[in-house]
Amino acid sequence: MSTSLLLLIIVVIGLIAFFAGRARSFAQSGGKLANLHSLPGYHGSYVVIWATLPAVLVLAAWLIASPFYIDSAVRSALPDSVQSQGAATVQLALGQVKSVALGLDRLSAADIAAIENGSANLRETLAAKGVALAGEGEHYMVAAAQQFNSMRLYSRWLMSAVVLIVSVAGGFYAIRNIAIRFRARNQVERVILASLIVASSIAILTTIGIIGSMLSEAGRFFSMVSPTEFFFGTVWDPRFAAAGNEGASGQFGLLPLLGGTIYIAFVAMLFAVPIGLFAAIYMAEYASPRLRSTAKPLLEVLAGIPTIVYGFFALVTVGPFLRDISTQLNGLITGNYQNFIQAQSVITAGIVMGIMLIPFVSSLSDDIITQVPRALRDGSLGLGATRSETVKKVILPAALPGIVGALLLTASRAVGETMIVVLAAGVAARMQLNPFEPMTTVTVKIVHQLTGDLEFTSPQTLVAFALGITLFVITLCLNIYALYIVRKYREQYE
């Protein structure tokens, strides 16, 4: 029985259990719901929990443990000549056995007998049936594949029987517990509370796991490269060691990448903040409800465009446009028609990234401005101030902490951007202040160092984790400070 069908049966059992529990609570009350401690719906939900939750947990545990047990049994049954060649050979043979098992049902008894006595080639026989096999294959793999299929089939049927028995038994157990003063509501709410705690724990544990994995790999990197060289180095040149020259590990200076990250993010914020903030002020204070309901969703469409599309826009349109404009301006001023703005440059990436950030600034700032109490507006207007004076002297100062927090959250979004920088700013790691020249960021180099079929054994690949944990700390600090400011703002006006 397939897993999806089994889950469907558990759902059906749960529905039946709900109505059965609800009916039993009615019967116990004698038609007077006031006699019950909990409403009939809670009794039905209580029975549903016992009929579904234990069965689903058993199913999940079985699906996780069964493949390990079957693989271990098949691996131990492989010939001694295979097991003596090491773990890698055994794992390769196990993979081939699984491939044979997938096509075993296409082979006839005569084909299997011919393979086992050596008169037919396993790979050619499977290929004739439309099944590809990596390697030539050995005759013992047929018997191992048969064992694999039989164990998997037996495990599947046994799992179905156990899960259904657990589901039905849980439902009957819960129905028997239903009584007039049974606290079904408390039991259901306890399960819901436990589910909320588990969901929160998963999010927290995932974050801890990500941080732990990055820290462990970054620790390996810093055991090979000095932290001082990494954090204070001014040259980024992580050369991969050539054959016979393992000592050439290159230079891993973070400052060029960090400078490019901050520079491009600064240009993007310089472009996005005025436009986004002015748009938010207009939408919140001046636009009519009809215009606001139309323009604001259109503005926020920009936030849903994939960043790779922005990168193409920068590469094909914005970069060549700035390059051609610089050529014309240079020709008019000096007579030398030579561009001084590169197609891939800091300003190209900053402008396009700023366009992407406009809806973030606008939406967050608009929500904060509209949360300013109406009494402040009315008091200012009642004292004779104009609408523009009210915005400048009352609304913006009142909303300033929240706006600053929104801008910091937007800045953390800009720091982590990758695709726009790859296509619009290039991959040159350099320290310079000319916004018309290419630079690169930390995220681009993380992708660059992990591109290709590489092993995490050299500093050239492990440096990606050091870059990742550095970027994580930067964005974490920005987010914490932004949340602190936003919380302070909310405490002031709630």
Image (tube, rainbow, N blue to C red):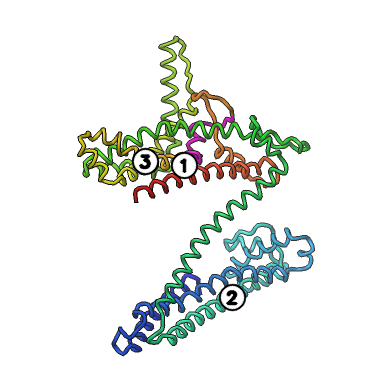
Which residue was labeled with disc 1?
Answer: 413
Q: Earlier in the sequence, mark 2 or mark 1?
A: 2
Camera-side residue of 180 and 145: 180
Which residue was labeled with disc 3?
Answer: 359
| Residue depicted at 49% across the width and 29% down the height | 346
Rendering coords of residue 369 (x, y %) = 32, 42
Q: Give the CA distance from mark 2 to mark 1.
A: 48 Å
| Residue depicted at 48% across the width and 34% down the height | 265
Rendering coords of residue 183 (x, y %) = 41, 80
Q: How many neighbours does mark 3 have within 10 angstroms: few (below 14), some (14-19), or many (20 or more)?
A: many
Per the rendered image, the range of residues in magenta is 412-429
Query: Which type of secondary structure does the marked residue at label 1 adopt?
Result: helix
Q: Give the CA distance from mark 2 to mark 3.
A: 53 Å
Q: Earlier in the sequence, mark 2 or mark 3?
A: 2
Q: Is 490 left or right of 62, judged from the image as shown? A: left
Rendering coords of residue 423 (x, y %) = 49, 34
| Residue depicted at 65% across the width and 73% down the height | 147
Q: How many neighbours does mark 1 have within 10 angstroms: few (below 14), some (14-19), or many (20 or more)?
A: some
In terms of image quadrants, where is residue 472? top right
Q: Is residue 489 above or below residue 166?
A: above
Report the mark closest to the observer, 2 or 3.
3
Q: Amino acid at mark 3?
A: Pro
Residue 414 forms part of the magenta stretch? yes
Query: Which type of secondary structure does the marked residue at label 3 adopt?
Result: helix
Q: How many neighbours does mark 2 have within 10 angstroms: few (below 14), some (14-19), or many (20 or more)?
A: some
Which residue was labeled with disc 2?
Answer: 155
| Residue depicted at 79% across the width and 65% down the height | 81
Is the residue under label 1 in contact with that under label 2 (CB below 8 Å)? no
The reply to whether residue 234 is visible in this rendering is yes
Q: Is residue 423 above or below residue 70?
A: above
Q: Residue furthest top?
A: 335
